[in-house]
Every structure is written in C-alpha cells, then in structure tokens.
Image: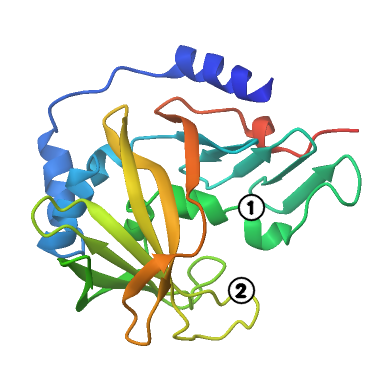
Amino acid sequence: MKKIFLLLTIAILVSCKKDVKSATEKEQLKKESFSDELAKVFEKHGGIATWRKAKTLSFNKGKEAHTSDLQSRKIVINSPTYSLGFDGKKIWLDQEDSTAFKGNKDFYYNLYFYFYAMPFVLADDGVIYEKVASIYFEGMKYPGYKISFKANVGTSSDDNYKVYYNSETYQMEWLAYTVTFTDKEPNNDYHIIKYNKWEDVDGFLLPKEITWYKMDEKGTPTIPQGPPTVFTLPLVSEGELGASFFDKPAK
C-alpha cells in the first residue's frame, strides 16, 4: 500500500521536465572534477545536472520496495514482513518477528540504492577519480575509472569503486567495488557486477538487471556467480516526499 501511495503522491508532485539545459546548468558541468570521459558516461545516462534536480528515487527488488530522498539520502525499504530505513539521524528496523529480516540493517539499508543509482552516485561530493587499466570480456575492451572518497565522507569512506564503460557509446557496463564495512580498513578484495540491462526511466538510463561475476587472478570477469538481480517499478521524480515517510512506523 505504501508503494501505491508513493506513486500517487509523486504523480501529483512531479513537475514537467525541461528539454533544454540552461546556461547555468552548462556552466555547472564545467566546474565538475571528473574527466571528459566520465562526463560522457553521466550524460549517456541522463546527465548530472538533471539528476541533481531529482528529489525521489524508487524501485522494487523482489518483494522489497526501496524509496530514497536523493537530496538527504533518507531511505525506506518496505516488504511484506519488515521495513527498515534511515530517517536522517538513525537507521531503524521494524519487523513482524526477530527472524523476518536476515542481515545487518546498517549495511543493507542503502546497499541496493548505491547499485541502482549508478553511475550518478559516483559524482557525489568528496569523490576522487583516477584512470585505471581497461578490462576485457568476450573480446570487448572496457575502459575504466577508479572512484575513491576523501576521508570521513559517507559511512564507508575507504570503499573503492571502479566503473567500466563501453568506449563507443559511453554506457556503463561493469562495476567493481570493495567492502570495508566489517573490517573498517582499506582492501583490494574487489567484487564485480555486470550491468546486463538498462531501461529509460523518465529520461534516465537506470539498471533493470545486474549480475555478480566471478573473476580470475588478474581481475578479469569470467562467469556469473548466480542468477541476475532484477529491478522493477522504477520511478524518478522532482517531487519531494514528506519527512514522515521515512520515519519508523509507530506502534
């Protein structure tokens, strides 16, 4: 029901998109710290200036409905047996019983937001860009950039990402990443995701299907680790939800 309410609310709040970028937006793009290649990747997926106007992002992963405030990064995940989220101050969990949610709420609450909001989250404040060696898969070459964070940026500033893109279309194709949530220390233990399918969501190219891959000793992707993760019911809007939408449900 909350997902239906969200869709109805956004339908009322959304304002018309402008097809032509203003001079101010173009000037803003010139001030970005990323390279011309990454700028083309962001532009291929809908444009940074347009993305930064958006207020609400929503998508479903299986039975979970993920909704985020793109400005404050508040998040709520609703499922038939549990809800969890971040209200701007604390991460909360509400479930029918102690076994409904299996996992670490602090790690999970924004995990798929980051995977889904690629490549745009790689243009956040405090990001450092570095060109890296290309990867090869099935005869195709994919140039890449490493993305790291300045100290104390976000909850896991020691995490690193590598985004790889199609050199002809500039569409993002792969994401490699490290996880420092548990050990709280930098590492080079990369995992890699193939962005199999994309879809147009109100002018943005957002993922429809992603698959984790195994890698060889050189870091080259080899075969899928398992079935793909599929996203449904996508929504991006300039409409803003009320703060209470992200609060833990009252008992």
Q: Residue at x 60, y 44 (%)?
A: 75
- For badge 2, the amino acid type reads Phe
- Colour treatment of the image: rainbow
**Callout 1: few (<14), some (14-19), or many (20+) C-alpha neighbours within 10 Å?**
many
Q: Left or right: where does residue 152 sit relative to residue 30?
A: right
Viewer-closest of 73 and 161: 161
Which mark is on residue 183? none
Q: Residue at x 34, y 80 (%)?
A: 219
Q: Left or right: where does residue 64 sit relative to residue 121?
A: right
Q: Which residue is mark 2?
A: 181
Q: Residue at x 66, y 31 (%)?
A: 245
Please state the horizontal and vertical placement of residue 230, each as a whole percent of the image.
48, 42
Does residue 52 appear in this view? no
Q: Which residue is mark 1?
A: 109
Please state the horizontal and vertical placement of residue 203, each as a whole percent of the image.
26, 30
Query: In the rendered view of the protein, which quadrant contains the N terminus?
Result: top right
